[in-house]
Image: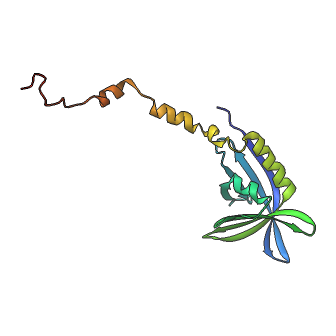
């Protein structure tokens, strides 16, 4: 089966304070064989890249309105007149607030939505086909369905 990969490299800003941020090279990745998830790799090209995976739906919604809770929260805002998407990531190793250009994230998301339209993700996984195959009766099922202990009742009424 052919799988589609949609990737985009971009520069995010790691917000350290209201006055200070540093550029962080990142790669957004989407694979049709993992249709519910998006993958973000930070510090690409370094010895210690950082990988995050979360729901594509969370990023799609976060471009338009605040969403998420817990480890990943995403929301749109404006900074110096530019539309950006903020991503707050939290882990036992620390917290990060990242800023991404809305136009670049939205264009990449559009490509993922063309590759696998919303609502068709389960079809990509073949879950229904796999379940049907697992649950299909086989000749051996007849053996399991037979009563292994015939009734004790006598047919001639003894």
Location of the C terminus (image quadrant): top left
Residue 97, x across and y down, in percent: 75, 69
What residue is at 84 percent from the left and 75 percent from the top?
Answer: 20
The residue depicted at 75 percent of the width and 57 percent of the height is 61
Instruction: List x then y, in percent, for residue 117.
Output: 73, 42
Q: Nearer the viewer, residue 78 or 147?
A: 147
Residue 89: name its quadrant. Answer: bottom right
Residue 143 falls left or right of residue 77: left
Query: Looking at the picture, how far across and down is residue 115, in whole percent?
Result: 75, 40
Q: In the image, is residue 139 above or below residue 42?
A: above
**Is residue 39 something that shows in the picture?**
no
Identify the image quadrant of residue 100: bottom right
Q: Residue furthest right?
A: 81
Determine the image quadrant of residue 3: top right
Is residue 11 visible in this depiction of the protein?
yes
Position of 140 compared to 115: left or right? left
Q: How is the image coloured?
A: rainbow
């Amino acid at each position: 089966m052919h799988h589609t990969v949609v990737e985009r490299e971009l520069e995010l800003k790691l917000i350290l304070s209201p006055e200070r941020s540093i550029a962080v090279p990142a790669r957004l990745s989407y694979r049709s064989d993992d249709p519910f998830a998006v993958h973000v790799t930070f510090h690409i090209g370094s010895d210690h890249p950082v990988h995050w995976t979360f729901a594509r739906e969370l990023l799609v919604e976060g471009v338009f309105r605040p969403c998420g809770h817990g480890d990943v929260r995403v929301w749109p805002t404006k900074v110096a007149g530019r539309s950006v998407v903020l991503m707050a990531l939290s882990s036992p190793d620390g917290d990060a607030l990242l800023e991404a250009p809305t136009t670049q994230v939205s264009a990449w998301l559009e490509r993922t939505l063309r590759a696998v339209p919303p609502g068709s993700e389960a079809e990509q996984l073949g879950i229904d086909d796999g379940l049907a195959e697992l649950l299909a009766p086989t000749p051996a099922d007849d053996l399991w369905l037979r009563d292994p202990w015939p009734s004790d009742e006598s047919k001639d009424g003894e």
